[in-house]
């Protein structure tokens, strides 16, 4: 099995392999073009994202600068996904994000890991595990999601949290390591922030 074939299997491989690097650099050139666009070049950004991503639905918006190891080549976005400044997707293997999910500034989603054994790291070995993020999630500013994580639908992750274990649907989770604080509940239908009531006309 070639190094390139091991990229999506979870096996150890060498990311500096010539075949892998050729593809990666080509994708990073497109990412550079995206990050170099002007704020008024919205249509150009949309067109570039369709070229860059494995899949991207309608209504998605990513605020530059955007960082991705493979320029989004292994990223699958549903529709209406929003990402604020500084999203980093370490997309050495696949990252799946459901419809209407939002990323705060400077979120990191990583799929790449390195072995603990020093001798293997010395040789440059790496492995990749996919990340799955459900629909209608809100990932707070500065959150970090590590390789192999699955997050359910309608999850809110607090700013600065480090997600090291899977999270079920319909929860608020915070901390380092990130833990479930509570379920999304009926009170959330009444208040949106510290006693501020939701106007039902907005629903």
Image (cartoon, rainbow, N blue to C red):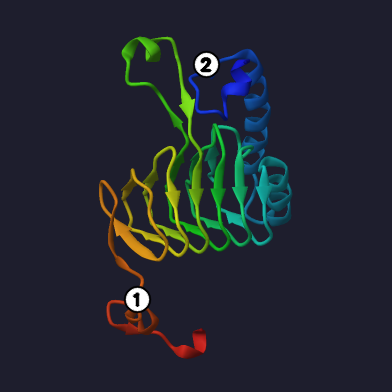
Residue 159 coordinates in the image, percent (x, y): 33, 55
Camera-near label (2 vs 1) is: 1
In the figure, residue 24 lies in which quadrant? top right
The residue wearing badge 2 is 14
> In the image, what residue occupies the spot 67% across and 20% down?
22
Depicted 147 relative to depicted 171: above or below: above
Depicted 118 relative to depicted 102: above or below: above
Q: Looking at the image, can residue 195 be seen?
A: yes
Instruction: Answer with left or right where residue 25 lies relative to residue 93.
Output: right
> In the image, what residue occupies the spot 43% across and 56% down?
104
Mark 2 or mark 1, earlier in chain: 2
Q: How much space separates mark 2 and mark 1, taking CA atoms?
A: 46 Å
Residue 147 coordinates in the image, percent (x, y): 43, 37
The residue wearing badge 1 is 185
Residue in front for this viewpoint, 106 or 10: 10
> In the image, what residue occupies the spot 33% across and 68% down?
183
Q: Looking at the image, can residue 35 be seen?
A: no
The local secondary structure at tag 1 comes to: loop
Residue in front for this viewpoint, 76 or 64: 76
Instruction: Answer with left or right where residue 144 lies relative to residue 99.
Output: left
Residue count near mark 2 (Cα–Cα under 10 Å), binned few <14, some 14–19, many ≥20: some
Dots 2, 1 in contact, CB < 8 A: no
Q: Quadrant of the N terminus?
A: top right
Depicted 195 relative to depicted 104: above or below: below
Depicted 195 relative to depicted 126: above or below: below
Residue 39 coordinates in the image, percent (x, y): 62, 54
Badge number at residue 127: none
Residue in front for this viewpoint, 20 or 52: 20
The local secondary structure at tag 2 comes to: loop
Residue count near mark 1 (Cα–Cα under 10 Å), binned few <14, some 14–19, many ≥20: few
Residue 63 coordinates in the image, percent (x, y): 55, 52
The number of discs equals 2
């Amino acid at each position: 099995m070639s190094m390139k074939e091991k990229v999506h299997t979870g096996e150890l491989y060498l990311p500096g392999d010539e075949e892998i690097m050729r593809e990666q650099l080509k994708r990073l050139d497109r990412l550079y073009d995206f990050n170099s666009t002007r704020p008024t070049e919205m249509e150009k950004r949309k067109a570039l994202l369709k070229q860059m991503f494995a899949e991207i639905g309608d209504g998605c918006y990513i605020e530059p600068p955007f960082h991705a190891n493979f320029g989004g080549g292994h990223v699958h976005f549903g529709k209406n996904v929003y990402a604020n400044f500084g999203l980093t997707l370490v997309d050495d293997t696949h990252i799946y994000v459901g419809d209407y999910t939002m990323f705060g500034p400077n979120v990191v989603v990583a799929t790449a890991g390195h072995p603990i054994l020093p001798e293997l790291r010395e040789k440059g070995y790496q492995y990749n595990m996919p990340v799955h993020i459900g629909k209608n999630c809100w990932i707070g500013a500065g959150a970090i999601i590590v390789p192999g994580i699955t997050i359910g639908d309608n999850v809110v992750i607090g700013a600065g949290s480090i997600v090291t274990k899977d999270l079920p649907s319909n929860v608020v989770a915070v901390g380092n390591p990130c833990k479930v604080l509570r379920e999304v509940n009926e009170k959330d239908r009444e208040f949106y922030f510290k006693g501020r009531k939701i106007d039902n006309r907005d629903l």
